[in-house]
Image (cartoon, coloured by chain):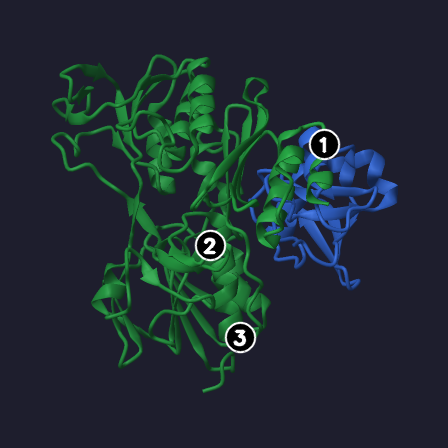
Chain colours: A blue, B green
Amino acid sequence: MTKIIYVEHNGTQHEIDVKVGLSVMEGAVKNSVPGIDADCGGACACATCHVYVDDAWVEKTGKPDELEASMLEFAENVEPTSRLSCQIKVTDALEGLTVKMPASQH
Amino acid sequence: MTDGAVGARVVIVGAGHAGGSAAAFLRQYGFAGAITLIGEEPIAPYQRPPLSKAWLKGEADADALMLKPESYYSEHNVDLRLSAVAVAIDRAARTVTLGDGGTVAYDHLILATGARARRLPIPGATLGNMLELRNAADAERVKAILGPGKRLAIVGGGYIGLEVAASARALGAEAVIIEREARVLARVACQPLSAFFQDYHSARGVTFELDAGVEAFEGETNVTGVRLSDGRVLPCDAALVGVGAVPNDEMARAAGLACDGGIVVDLAARTSDPAIFAIGDVTRRPLPLYDRMHRLESVPNALEQAKQAACAITGKAAPAPEVPWFWSDQFDLKLQIAGLPFDVEEIVIRGNPADAKFAVFHLKAGVIVAVEAVNAPPEFMMGKNLIGSRKPVSIDKLRNPTVSMKEVAA
């Protein structure tokens, strides 16, 4: 289990223990964290699990691959630390990872 | 009675993606009454799209398929009744009768009964190793059979057939697709896309029998071959039939709800009985963008209608209508489709199919009504926006891949 901190757009925090190997998106959906819709269930096909990775964690979560980057390019309210949370696999190294949600996924 | 009040009872028939999501949205939107979720399968709601893709190839486990962890239902006070079948609706008494004779009372009923695989009424259809792929148990059977040296015959060249063929090849099995039309995806995609997918699959060892009728499945106990109308028999170890789906609207029809090849609903997912909603594959729903009624088989549609019903029941404003969209993964291809190609006057291909990176735009009166994008997320994402906005585009810019999609949409 790795602790992931999800912060809703309104500031509400959710500290969730997520099984290693799941994605950051799956950790949110399975625990009913509001603000991550994940319509496609993790196929990198919809860009509705958009999050902002906390600056301190950007290096550890890595950069989006080409497909994810081009999905993000057309998502709403994109910032330099934007990621699709379905593409971030939870590992032990991400203990304490903090991600923030945009105002809306659509 | 006040919608959403404590004491209101919502009964959801069907614990698939639509039904399971409706229960979760009701709680997310603050519904405090009783929720009963009735499902025929022995397992809690799960995602179906991976069954023919990641799950079949062993890249996702059963846990990863679940919509919510098992504990969700007790923690959120959802009475999840598995292996339970609803057999009738008494609209006057507002009850649902279950297969064991018991009844469940409702103030609001949500029908999420889905669709079942269409079967072929031909000899041999009930032999062993005859497969279909709608649910987890089906996928388990398919997975158990596929492997090196096995030969799978797939009747039907639609998305399910192509996805299973790709997964079968990944597992080292042979796959032949038998299609009665002259091209694969004939009902759901344009000719250039059909040609592209057929070529791509052929190059990876999938074989095709097009314009081919199926007369019978042969074998003693298990299927051993598929007999075509030209007399040839294609040997196989298993045969999968993927020739479309039939909405499970019989119970709704018997209860007198308006049905027309699916339960007819409005944009709040309400049926002809204001106390009853219907969501997901089983519905015939309005498509405001296309000014017609249609049945959609897709997860985004199930989620959209689950939100519509949950909003109506909790008194929230209806969500904004969405552009229908679909996706499919085959080999290393990502296909993303937005919109539906109704009354198309012009087709524009952007990019080159030979690069396995292109998009086909369908236009009517200068407006994009659908896009099929292969490994082309910008075309899909921006195309989806343009379909929703109905903004006319320059065909010359659209056709030119050196002009960015942002500029096309500007």
Q: Amino acid at mark 1?
A: Val
The residue where tag 2 is placed is B290
Q: Earlier in the sequence, mark 2 or mark 3?
A: 2
Residue A42, percent across and down? 59, 41
Q: What chain does mark 1 sit on? A: B
Q: How packed is label 1: few (under 14 Cα within 10 Å), some, or many (20 or more)? A: few
Q: Is residue A63 above or below residue A34?
A: above
Residue B312, percent across and down? 50, 73
The residue where tag 1 is placed is B403
Residue at x-position 42% and y-position 67%:
B266
Whether residue A1 can be seen here: no
Q: Secondary structure at mark 3?
A: helix
Q: Is residue B162 left or right of residue B308?
A: left
> Closer to the observer: label 3 or label 1?
1
Residue B272, percent across and down? 33, 72
Residue B197 marker:
none
* Picture quadrant of residue B94: bottom left
Residue at x-position 44% and y-position 17%:
B199
Q: Is residue A104 left or right of residue B325?
A: right
